[in-house]
Image (cartoon, rainbow, N blue to C red):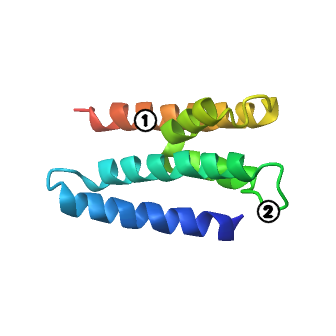
Amino acid sequence: MLRYFVIPGIIALVGALVLMQLIDVLTALWAWLISITIVTFFTYGYDKLIAGSARLRVPENTLLALAFVGGTVGALAGMALFHHKTSKRSFQLKLVIVLLVQVTLLVLYIVYTNRT
């Protein structure tokens, strides 16, 4: 899985750095989220494109990892637009778990940072 994650991860990192240079007011977090969302979206599209061919597919764990590190919106958009992984309930359940973990972490962050 790691080798499949490295290329999209590097592309997302470079994309985030470029975004930060182009848009001065963009924080590192927002640059990362925008970049990883775009990379995740296109990774889902690529995997759908090669589905059914003899080419190596993107492992499900890589698709889930991309969502987990911030690409959830891209994953959901890719699933909807490309109709990818929409009938695979086990994958959808794992993606929902990723989303729940992210929401939980966000709520904890908000609660923790708003303490007086």
Taking 56 as reference, is 84 left or right?
Answer: left
Q: Amino acid at mark 2?
A: Arg
Q: Residue at x 78, y 63 (%)?
A: 56
> Residue at coordinates 66% horizontally, 36% vertically from top-left?
95
Measured as percent of width and height from the top left, residue 112 is found at 35, 36
Q: Which mark is residue 106?
A: 1
Q: Which quadrant holds residue 85?
A: top right
Residue 80 figure quarter: top right
Q: In whole angstroms, how far apart are the C-alphas of marks 1 and 2?
A: 37 Å
Residue at mark 2: 55
Residue extending furthest toward the left: 24
* Residue at horizontal 54 percent and vertical 34 percent from the top: 77
Q: Is there a contact, CB below 8 Å, between mark 1 and mark 2?
A: no
Report x, y in % for residue 72. Answer: 53, 39
Work out whether residue 107 or residue 19 is closer to the camera in this orientation and state it. Answer: 19
Relative placement, left or right, of 88 versus 49 is: right
